[in-house]
């Protein structure tokens, strides 16, 4: 059987973080599992050489336009027509509006529908932003209603889809993402980056729904009581991070108390995780949430919000607080600074939990979804 995968999001840089990681890890695992069926990967020039082929039944095709462009909307159906797959797996809702052949979609979240702040956050002209939002809505509608099957990483995302759209729950399969433990970062000296213990860490993009403004406000109260403590924010430098830096300056933190580490390497990020006091992840909404799991796998405590999928994903392994409960967040951070060794927070990821979040297992379950299209693993 011939299967196509829209891999234009391949890699965390090209894919903008979570989606890129999902695509790369899924393809890597599928190459280990299936040596019989034919896979055709659609990649942009930025990711074409970054995607290694380790199995002879996998092939790469160059796509010249990104998923969010009108040119990409025209190009992809033509290329898929030439490949002529039994079905196509789209790892995001960016399905070409004119595409009519069978496909399935992975929908990671519906934050764009649930959170007005996220939906309206843009630097574009209002007219351009309006057109973009209309296009996004049409693409999402097509992905939801015309997909033969839908994969979500959490039951929370599945329920949100059922809340927003009139579709059968039997059409949706929950497959948890895998987890890769961050590197140890033993060769990294964090003082070279102006980072000194003790510090709290946040990891991820700086979009409004990630709630970093709330974290900054809470940490202002913590810094007043523990002036030697710091908050380190690791993510991508963009318009949203610049706004956050300006807000941090308005709080008059001491130079060592707030550090932005932009686009850290895997080694630096690993060092940041392993040497932190705890991870703070206060996103209002989250379709899955890798950073808390990564911190737990490094043996670090996690303070997370009780929003979105986080209670489902983390269970009792993290201290969950309300995404607007400043007193609770301040209290959780102070507790760790004053009595870290005897903290009641769970600071380890159990072996069973690690097995639950396995890329190999996620790929196996994805192949089971493929069986709806007549796929058989020989």
Image (cartoon, rainbow, N blue to C red):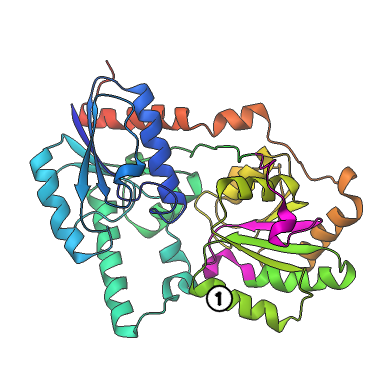
The residue lying at 69 percent from left, 66 percent from top is 259
The residue lying at 62 percent from left, 75 percent from top is 245
Q: 315 above or below 129?
A: above
Q: 15 above or below 354?
A: below
Q: Can residue 98 be seen in this view?
A: no
Horizontally, residue 105 falls left or right of residue 243, namely left
Q: Is residue 209 magenta?
A: yes
Q: In which quarter of the image is residue 102?
A: top left
Residue 45 x, y percent position in the rendering: 27, 51
Q: State the count of labels.
A: 1
Quarter that holds the C terminus: top left
Q: What element carries label 1?
A: helix
For mark 1, does the 10 Å Cα neighbourhood hold few (<14), some (14 to 19), or many (20 or more) residues? few
Residue 358 x, y percent position in the rendering: 51, 31
The residue lying at 62 percent from left, 43 percent from top is 294
Q: 97 above or below 224?
A: above
Q: Does the magenta stretch include residue 29?
A: no
Q: Can residue 85 be seen in this view?
A: yes
Horizontally, residue 356 falls left or right of residue 129, namely right
Horizontally, residue 351 falls left or right of residue 42, namely right
Question: What residue occupies the far top of the structure in this picture?
Answer: 378
Q: In which quarter of the image is residue 193?
A: bottom right
Q: Quadrant of residue 369?
A: top left
Quarter that holds the N terminus: top left
Residue 126 x, y percent position in the rendering: 34, 84
From the viewer's side, name the closer residue of 271 and 311: 271
Q: What residue is pinned by disc 1?
A: 242
The residue lying at 65 percent from left, 64 percent from top is 323
From the viewer's side, name the closer residue of 327 and 181: 181
Q: Give the range drawn in magenta.
A: 184-212
């Amino acid at each position: 059987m011939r299967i196509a995968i829209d891999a234009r999001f391949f890699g965390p840089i090209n894919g903008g973080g979570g989606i890129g990681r999902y695509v790369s890890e899924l393809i890597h695992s599928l190459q280990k599992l299936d040596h019989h069926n034919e896979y055709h990967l659609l990649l942009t020039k930025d990711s074409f050489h970054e995607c290694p082929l380790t199995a002879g039944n996998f092939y790469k095709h160059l796509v010249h336009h990104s998923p969010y462009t009108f040119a990409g909307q025209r190009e992809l159906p033509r290329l898929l027509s030439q490949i002529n797959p039994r079905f196509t797996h789209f790892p995001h809702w960016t399905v070409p509006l004119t595409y009519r052949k069978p496909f399935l979609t992975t929908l990671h979240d519906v934050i764009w529908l649930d959170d007005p702040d996220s939906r309206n956050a843009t630097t574009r002209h209002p007219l351009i932003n309006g057109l973009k939002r209309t296009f996004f809505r049409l693409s999402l509608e097509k992905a939801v209603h015309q997909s033969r099957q839908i994969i979500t990483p959490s039951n929370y995302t599945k329920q949100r889809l059922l809340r927003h759209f009139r579709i059968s729950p039997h059409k949706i399969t929950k497959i948890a993402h895998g987890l890769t433990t961050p590197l140890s970062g033993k060769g990294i000296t964090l003082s070279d980056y102006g980072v000194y213990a003790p510090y709290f860490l946040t990891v991820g993009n700086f979009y409004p729904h990630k709630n970093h403004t709330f974290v900054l406000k809470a940490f202002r109260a913590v810094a007043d009581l523990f002036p030697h403590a710091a908050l380190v924010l690791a993510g991508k430098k963009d318009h949203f991070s610049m706004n956050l830096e300006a807000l941090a300056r308005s709080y008059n933190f001491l130079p060592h108390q707030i550090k932005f580490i932009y686009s850290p390497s895997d080694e630096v990020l690993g060092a940041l995780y392993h040497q932190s006091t705890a991870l703070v992840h206060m996103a209002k909404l989250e379709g899955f949430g890798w950073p808390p799991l990564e911190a737990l796998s490094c043996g670090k405590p996690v303070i997370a919000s009780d929003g979105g999928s986080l209670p489902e994903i983390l269970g009792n392994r993290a201290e969950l607080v309300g995404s607007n409960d400043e007193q609770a967040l301040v209290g959780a951070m102070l507790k760790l600074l004053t009595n870290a060794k005897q903290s009641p927070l769970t600071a380890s990821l159990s072996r069973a939990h690690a097995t639950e979040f396995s890329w190999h297992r996620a790929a196996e379950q994805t192949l089971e979804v493929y069986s709806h299209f007549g796929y058989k693993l020989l």
